[in-house]
Amino acid sequence: MKINQNYNKLPHNYLFTEIALRTEKYIKTHPTQKVIKLGIGDVTQPLSPVIANAMKQAVEELTKKETFRGYGPELGHVWARQSVADYYKNEMNVVLDIDEITIGDGIGEDLANITDLFNHGGNTVVIQDPVYPLYQSTTLMDSNDIIYVPCNEANGFLPTPPDSHSDIIYLCSPNNPTGAAFNFSQLKAWVDYALENNAIILFDAAYERFTSNNDCPRSIFQIEGARNCAIEFGSLSKTAGFSCIRSGYTIVPNDLNRDGMNLLRMWQQRQTTKYNGANYITQRGLEAALTPQGLKDADRNIAYYHHNAGLITSMLKEKGLFFTGGESSPYVWLKCPNGMKSWDFFQYLLDTVQVIGTPGVGFGPSGEGYFRLSAFNSTEQTIEALERLDTIL
Amino acid sequence: MKINQNYNKLPHNYLFTEIALRTEKYIKTHPTQKVIKLGIGDVTQPLSPVIANAMKQAVEELTKKETFRGYGPELGHVWARQSVADYYKNEMNVVLDIDEITIGDGIGEDLANITDLFNHGGNTVVIQDPVYPLYQSTTLMDSNDIIYVPCNEANGFLPTPPDSHSDIIYLCSPNNPTGAAFNFSQLKAWVDYALENNAIILFDAAYERFTSNNDCPRSIFQIEGARNCAIEFGSLSKTAGFSCIRSGYTIVPNDLNRDGMNLLRMWQQRQTTKYNGANYITQRGLEAALTPQGLKDADRNIAYYHHNAGLITSMLKEKGLFFTGGESSPYVWLKCPNGMKSWDFFQYLLDTVQVIGTPGVGFGPSGEGYFRLSAFNSTEQTIEALERLDTIL
């Protein structure tokens, strides 16, 4: 019996465990202090009624013999895939064939599962540093080599492609954790690099709807040539509040061929073999989320989070601290004052003003000396946290 | 860029496509004839009200700021895992630690994803023939070798372990497609073989609640030694009617170590990395499905399907045709009369009495000459189909 020993290579990422432990310890020893969390990378605004009603109606359908359903299509219902195609056409002027769209359970799942299509071993993978930990963990599990591309103040946290060859490239824009978003020409440089190297870009578009700058693409398919080198992953978690419901979509262009294989055909084979289709109730929710009313409700929530982000960035500007993000993202990535290290700044904020953020070094070595604040808490809590920070920064 | 060329090894399994095409062609040329489908491998009875109410309430919770939820635990909510632990204790007298239970989106997904834990290449995999196609496809995608174990009239479609060594063993009991169920001593022989060979049994228990014979185990963990060699996969699709909702659970015993690694720890690493947790609404549905009322409703549906299966097997007995299944399974596996081949019998039934079944050869070469009838249609339709079959068998 041969076990996948690559699991031994996985880093022990204690980031969120360590935050929880330090917070718990503080609360225990200071029971009367009120701690405010600006570390959370998750939505807090409730589900839109139009989505809830669609889902309740779907549940009700299943209770009646006449409208009960069994297994659905593995790649997603045609109406759900059409909703995504319409979204891309109406919002981004990107024309997709519905066969290029599959409905899944979220970006995390699909980004992990897409690596089934690539050889495990023998591929070189580009990953930004700092970064959402999934990309690195999956690559290590698959025994591929990694080129880390540092994101730092010098490149505005928007790195250019490496000089050497690579095969697979993870990009997330607007980015988690830095909040930085590529503009059209910056993203075009990555597409050109991928085409030259016959590489595939795995484009994580989880935060596309937070893009408030017209100079920044929301889909990589807004860039010429991307249909020949990119796969895009979309999510309803951060826009429609589906993080506990799990819903997303993946777009593999028809035109994507490598090593004698068509990647769309392979992805369809993978999903029809190893996946039994997304939840019917959830797909009705996705459909409702992408209606004009659903999108209006999403935009109201995003405006709420943007407002919080604006409050955070206003204070940082006033204090003269370097930061990126906030404009096209719910995350603000700031440089710790006075050259403090990420964890020292975390502890300093907790001890002095009882505000929790996320130490940048937890997302990778280039995150050392940085700190992530999230706009996902309530406006009231955000204001209170900023009033406290004002007293010490 | 190196692509997973194993996808080229996947068989072009035209079984259900071919059935659909032949049926469509018949209906087009005989528009006035009524076709009855006994081929369907999917439930038809509606969702229990107790489940629907729990899910609607969960949706409602998400519409209110006070009760809205973001990401849940990747391995499942504690209360959902506790429901499964209680089910095993109360129904099968199997004691599980809730840490050994993960909540997922169904057996198909978890059975495919568990293979991440094993080396791709270098393992020998035992698969029954005929069989549910997923096991073979996943193994081929993972580049492992296959030993097919024929299921036939001689062994009552309940094969004994092979003489040679293997590393991974897929077992499904009660079986799809044959409906045959291992008794305690037959399953014990497989556990003993796995222990001797240091192999892992992947036990697909999708139909465990259809077991009506006390001599047949419902969980492999009812067999001594199984905690050291087996992983079990359970589903709510066939019992509570969740096939379009997607819900299941996987049990990896704490005691399962191979090649210096603990498989439960690896599975937890896999799920916390590549999976973001099961849908909250669905987990509330699972919890309701495993309450006394939910199980009572499931049993009413299973009794309905068993009644249909009994009608089918009564006719086959009367006609003196060999069959297996039906007793502990919604499937009846019969030998085609007069030495007919599976597809010839399919076409004969369609042309003469307009009844659709599933050709056994579609599940593997040893299925040639056999045919699967399903008890999942309504009793009215089943009776009408049997009246028609009575005239030609």
Image: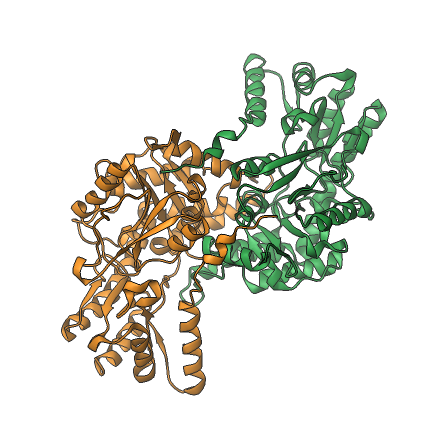
Chain colours: A green, B orange
Q: Quadrant of residue B379?
A: bottom left
Residue closest to the eye, A173 or B70: A173
**Rendered view: A15 above or below B10:** above
Image quadrant occupied by the C terminus of chain A: top right
- The quadrant holding residue B227 is top left
Residue A269 visible to an observer of this rendering? yes
The residue at 19%/49% (across/down) is B216
In this view, the residue farthest toward the top is A29
Q: Is residue A207 left or right of residue A245?
A: right
Residue occupying image coordinates x 49% and y 62%: A73
Q: Which x, y percent locates residue B340?
A: 25, 76
Q: Nearer the viewer, residue B267 or A115?
A: A115
Residue at 54% over, 15% down: A28
Position of the N terminus of chain A by quadrant? top left
Horizontally, is A321 left or right of B373 in the view? right
From the top left corner, tell me how far across and down residue B220 is, in percent: 26, 43
